[in-house]
Image: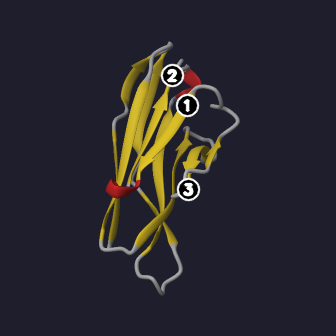
Amino acid sequence: QVQVVERGGGLMQSGGSLRLSCVASGSFFTSFEMGWYRQAFGEQRELVAEITDDGHITYGDSVKGRVTISRDNAKNTVYLQMNSLKPEDTAVYHCKAKVAQTAYLMPRDYWGQGTQVTVSS
């Protein structure tokens, strides 16, 4: 079983910063991409940032220049730093980890429950 748990979030001020962390735990062989997606009320889920196990990074267009994603492979943990927060950053932020439970199984995506980020103007 694989668990993906996010930490951080809450009520933030416009112009401020936030740092989220996400850890993938449980019994598995290795993790591949780990990343952050967000979903605002009534909107579709969108990519915030994703990082592969060898460090290749993709940022979502709406947050480029304001976010930094990093990961600690030894801890199966991914971090998200977001600066210059705007009210439109208000959303539930979900962590996704692509994990292979054994060396012989295809990797699959595991999602966390999400953490609410609310940015006040």
* Distance Cα–Cα, label 2 vs label 3: 22 Å
* Mark closer to the chain start, 1 or 2: 1
Q: Residue under circle 2?
A: 83
Q: How crowded is mark 2: few (under 14 residues within 10 Å), some or many (20 or more)?
A: some
* Distance Cα–Cα, label 1 vs label 2: 6 Å
* Mark closer to the chain start, 2 or 3: 3
Residue lying furthest bottom in this view? Answer: 104
The picture places residue 36, in percent across and down from the top left corner, at 51, 46
Residue shown at 40%/21% (left/top)?
Answer: 12
Residue shown at 67%/32% (left/top)?
Answer: 62
Q: What element carries label 3?
A: loop
Picture quadrant where residue 13 is located:
top left
The picture places residue 30, in percent across and down from the top left corner, at 42, 70
**What amino acid is found at the position of numbered circle 1 in the picture?**
Val
Q: How crowded is mark 3: few (under 14 residues within 10 Å), some or many (20 or more)?
A: some
Mark 1 touching mark 2, by CB under 8 A? Answer: yes
**What amino acid is found at the position of numbered circle 2 in the picture?**
Asn
Q: Residue under circle 1?
A: 67
Vertical relation: 7 (above or below) 34: above
In this rendered view, identify the residue nearer to me: 46 or 40.
Answer: 46
The picture places residue 98, in percent across and down from the top left corner, at 50, 65
Residue shown at 60%/41% (left/top)?
Answer: 42
Mark 1 touching mark 3, by CB under 8 A? Answer: no
Q: Nearer the viewer, mark 1 or mark 3?
A: 3
Q: Residue under circle 3?
A: 52
Left or right of 110: which side holds 67?
Answer: right
The picture places residue 49, in percent across and down from the top left corner, at 58, 43
Q: Is mark 1 on a helix, strand or loop?
A: strand
**What amino acid is found at the position of numbered circle 3 in the picture?**
Thr
